[in-house]
Image (cartoon, rainbow, N blue to C red):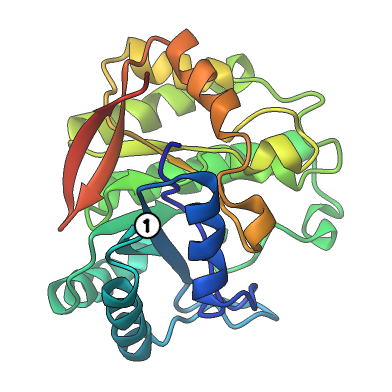
Amino acid sequence: MLPDYHFHTEFSGDSDTAVRDQLNAAIALGMDSLCVTDHHDYDVESIIDFILDIDPYMQTMAQIREEYKDRIDLRIGIELGLQVHLQDYFKELLDRYPFDFVIGSTHFINRTDPAYPSYFIGKKEEDVYLHYFETTLDNVKALDDYDVIGHLDYIVRYGPNKNKYYSYRAYSSIIDEILKTVIEKGKGIECNTAGLRKGIGQPNPSFDTLKRYRELGGEIITIGSDAHIPQDIGSDFETVRQILMDCGFTYYTEYKNRIPEFKKLF
């Protein structure tokens, strides 16, 4: 079973699932390893507190990693909410804490969460999508303190029409620029399976974007469920294994001590 490199626990503001419940679900599926990546969105306007209490998080995960060491290899990661003005903050944070893996995600646009229907009121859906990709491009150009970009076209989960009118082709110019920047910096992207269970029938990013990333020379790719409950751990992993192979990938990536490890997809 492919390892899950994007899931959340009670340490994330939008999950109340115990860490052990997530690990037990992974073990039941036959995973040998996985990486916890709880949210840390600093300096945002949100009704949910996405600030991670990092000291107890690291201490708890280290204890549970030791407890489970004979059953599963727990890697300790974090999902950072990228914002350009936090460049110095991220550097200090990652110099201080020894994470195995860092996802860099664009969750907020100008500190505001576009995951709520109210964000789209009075705006054209395509304009919001474009603004999201522009914000992502700004983030990947300015920032280096991440390993892979999380759920690149995340925004389409929340649009009024989701991906009914969305395609890689419609935004290919800016998506290509994002992908080229990521590759040039030696970073990667993730294949996030949540879209397959959130009404868009595709992973994030879409098949065409994943294929384009590979065509451009992208090699670093992690696989994550974005699970907030145990039932979603490893969700649709066999589907995305085939998707990635169809896109030309022969390897996926795991991380330890921020160093990529390439493993065969089949």
Residue 124 percent location from the top left of the image: 80, 40
Instruction: Describe residue 224's horizontal placement relative to residue 121 as left or right.
Output: left
Q: Residue at image x 48%, y 81%? A: 51
Question: At x 19% / y 30%, what residue is drawn?
Answer: 184
Could you tell me residue 225's position as x and y percent? 56, 47
Name the residue nearer the viewer: 25 or 246: 25
Q: Residue at the front extreme?
A: 70
For image coordinates 43% across by 37% down, the residue present is 2
Residue indicated by mark 1: 35
Number of residue marks: 1
Of residue 19 and residue 201, the one placed in the foreground of this image is 19
Looking at the image, which is closer to me, 224 or 97? 224
Tell me the quadrant of the picture where the C terminus can be found: top left
Decide: is 28 above or below 43: above
Tell me the quarter of the picture where residue 115 sits: bottom right
Residue 159: x percent and y percent? Answer: 78, 43
Q: Residue 227 at what x, y percent from top left? A: 60, 56
